Image (cartoon, rainbow, N blue to C red):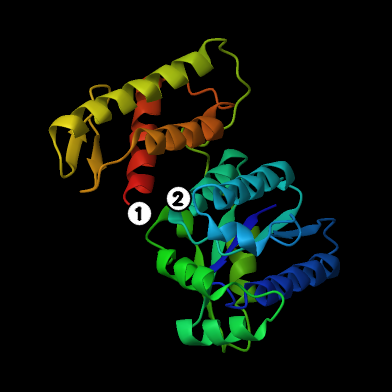
Amino acid sequence: MPLIVMCGFPSSGKTSRSTQIMQYFIDRFNNENKPNSVLLINDESLGISKDSYKDTRLEEKKSRGTLISAVERMISKDDLLIVDGMNYIKGFRYQLYCIARAIGTPHCVVYCGIPVEIAKEWNSKRVESGYDTTVFDELVSRFEEPDDRNRWDSPLFTVFYNDEAVPFDGIWDAVINKKAKPPNLSTVSKPVSETNYLYELEKTTQDIINEVLDAQKHNVGGGAVKISRTNRTVNLPSRTITLSEFRRLRRQFTNINKMHTLLDMDRVAELFVEYLNTNINR
């Protein structure tokens, strides 16, 4: 069954909308005698404190890791999984998209739209469960609005804070009636059959990182870096990307793909370049 990714500012009504969607699918599954379950996960169910968002480098990174692990553990072709959270970083939504594609199940994004002022007002009324004012402002400033031109944000359903109803039928159509796109080489999941696959994966990605770091030393100010193993380029921003940032991105990419037998390392190189471009320019 599919993956539904909620998205929006803090205190934008995501949990309320998630609950509505969950109840709709439960009722419809029952009415149509479908033996499927509906699962919902969020920070509260995973024991993630709102204080974790005060430290983007450590605690928040751990929180995202906890959420990703839960999705990987719970997603299946039999149950519907709703991820109720801000999911405000496009690179993170891309990871969720990859997980769904890897098992060949549909996915969609539901964006809870709301003016910042109203979200802030709602947050202030949540005395015990709201975000610290500074954290709220920082999360809003870092929010990357979903764009249905990106495959990981599509299909995209926008529900405004004052909408009376959620487009339930549209969501059902998108994730139940439409077949998932066939997994591509960036997400296809096969049992590892080549003993040297992980070694080759790590070597290929490390070679690319080394090329980019070397180019960055000589070309301060960003620009395109041609990668020798592929005809694609890594597009560096004007700021300097640190070694630790590259290591983090390489580790994320490896974790996503280490159980996927992508035998063509030239293709792996293309996918890693795409992954870098998606995440270093946000």
Q: In the image, what residue occupies the spot 85% across and 56% down?
A: 35
Q: Is residue 188 visible?
A: no
Q: Position of residue 263 (x, y in %)?
A: 47, 18
Tell me if label 1 and label 2 are in contact, CB under 8 Å. yes
As rendered, which of 17 and 24 lies closer to the eye? 17
Q: Which residue is painted at 58% across and 43% down in the image?
A: 99
Q: Name the spot of residue 37 as percent of width and height, x first.
A: 81, 57
Disc tally is: 2
Query: The C terminus lies in which quarter of the figure?
Result: bottom left
Taking the image as shown, residue 196 lies to the left or right of residue 267, namely: right
Q: How crowded is mark 2: few (under 14 residues within 10 Å), some or many (20 or more)?
A: many
Q: Name which residue lies at 55% across and 26% down.
A: 258
118 lies above or below 269: below
The residue positioned 70% from the left and 52% from the top of the image is 1
> Is 183 rendered above or below residue 259?
below
Q: On the image, which quarter does residue 107 sit in?
A: bottom right
For badge 1, the amino acid type reads Arg
**Label of residue 11 in the image:** none
Which residue is denoted by mark 2 in the rendering?
91
Question: Which residue does the numbered mark 1 point to in the structure image?
Answer: 282
Q: Which one is nearer the viewer's eye here, 146 or 141?
A: 141
- Looking at the picture, how far across and down is residue 210, in whole percent? 30, 24
Q: Is residue 154 above or below residue 279?
A: below
Check disc 1: other Cα within 10 Å, few if <14, some if 14-19, many if 20+: few
Identify the mark nearer the N-term, 1 or 2. Answer: 2
Residue 9 is situated, as x and y percent measured from the top left of the image, at: 52, 72
Please say whether residue 1 is visible from this viewpoint.
Answer: yes
**What amino acid is labelled 2 in the image?**
Gly
Q: Distance between the residues labelled 1 and 2?
A: 8 Å
